[in-house]
Image (cartoon, rainbow, N blue to C red):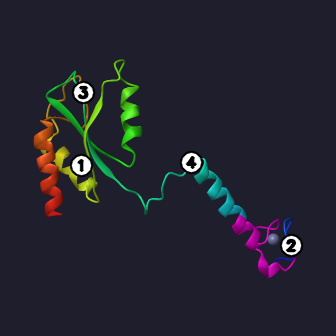
Amino acid sequence: MNNAVRYCRICKETDANKFYPLNHKKCKKCSNEYQNKKYLDKKDKGLIVSSIKNRIDYIYIITNPAWPKYIKIGRATNIENRLRSYQTSSPYRDYQISFQIQSNHSHKIERYFADKYRPKETDKYIVNEWYELSVEDAIKEIHSIILQS
Ligand SMILES: [Zn+2]
């Protein structure tokens, strides 16, 4: 039995039934409104980009003229952000998006390329997910995975 006095600082509610067990300072209604406002503020500031449920994934191919025989295939919700993170690692800012497509099968596609093309011996400059493959061939394979899915 919890006899603590309940008093909502916002709407002055005192009925204990209208409070969550551990919250003495705000009633359920004000507490919910507060949490909702906090969520919307975050969303306004761009701190919440999208919920997992509404997430839209893209498969992208990034290339760099320094390695003409290689492509990077990855998956992202925001490709521009992903590209920007690559550019910061290059003094020439010369990474480019060569292809992108929205797909519900992005995870499957990413795995497919990893299983098929991940180099056995990793070159000093070729890190994970850079594959020795042409953009054209990769696009053909991506389309065929999507068609079969
Ligand atoms: Zn209240």
Nearest to viewer (mark 1 / mark 3) = 3
Quadrant holding the C terminus: bottom left
Q: Which residues are magenta?
A: 13-33
Q: Amino acid at mark 1?
A: Glu
Q: Amino acid at mark 2?
A: Arg
User: Which residue, given by chain and number where applicable, does mark 4 sit on?
Assistant: 47
Secondary structure found at label 2: loop
| Side of 40 where 107 appears, left or right | left
Secondary structure found at label 1: helix
Q: How many marks?
A: 4
What separation in Å lies between label 3 and label 2 (alpha carbons)? 63 Å
Nearest to viewer (mark 3 / mark 2) = 3
User: Which residue, given by chain and number where applicable, does mark 3 sit on?
Assistant: 64
Q: Which callout, 1 or 4, points at the residue further toward the start of the chain?
A: 4
Q: Which callout, 4 or 3, points at the residue further toward the start of the chain?
A: 4
Q: Would you say the residues marked 1 and 2 are in contact, meaning their CB atoms lie under 8 Å apart?
A: no
What separation in Å lies between label 4 and label 2 (alpha carbons)? 33 Å
User: Which residue, given by chain and number where applicable, does mark 2 sit on?
Assistant: 6
What separation in Å lies between label 1 and label 2 (alpha carbons)? 54 Å
Q: Residues within 10 Å of mark 3 (few under 14, many from 20)?
A: some
Image point 82% across, 65% down: which residue?
Answer: 25
